[in-house]
Amino acid sequence: GACIAYNLVRLEMANVAADAQCNPTDISFVRAFHIIQYELTWAAATRAYGKLPSLLQRMRQRLVTELTVKRPGRHFDRGVKSKAQRYPYKKSKA
């Protein structure tokens, strides 16, 4: 289920990025996940099914407004940090 949810969020991010004519990497995954979660919670609570298209359109507009802000002065790209070692490395005398 987690893989399906992940791929659905990524798919929605790609669709929104194509509509906004930007790169999908300009949209933060965490922000997109929270927006989608919030909007779908409200969509599930509504009893009028005729409002669903407008709720989905509002969700897509919020995703566009939450594009990742390009921070000036950033020198390094984001990357995965290596896991901290539990024990220090033994240095050999060579």
Image (tube, rainbow, N blue to C red):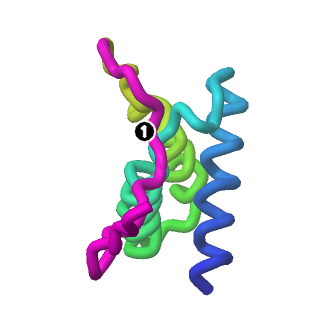
Q: Is residue 70 left or right of residue 22?
A: left
Residue 75 versus residue 8: which sits nearer the camera? 75
Residue interval drawn in magenta: 73-94
**Label 1's element?**
helix
Q: Residue at the spot x=37%, y=65% of the render?
A: 93
Q: Which residue position is annotated with label 1?
A: 62
Q: Residue at x 49, y 32 (%)?
A: 64
Instruction: List the single residue furthest toward the front.
Output: 94
Judging depth in this view, the residue of 42 and 28 nearest the camera is 28
**In screen coordinates, is 65 left or right of 73?**
right
Q: Residue at x 64, y 51 (%)?
A: 12
Question: In which quadrant will I find the C terminus?
Answer: bottom left
Position of the N terminus by quadrant: bottom right
Q: Locate residue 71, reporting x and y percent.
A: 32, 20
Q: Is residue 62 above or below residue 21?
A: below
Q: From the image, give the main secondary structure of the stretch colored magenta.
A: loop
> Residue 8 in the image: x percent, y percent?
66, 64
Q: Is residue 75 left or right of residue 16?
A: left
The image quadrant that residue 47 belongs to is: bottom left
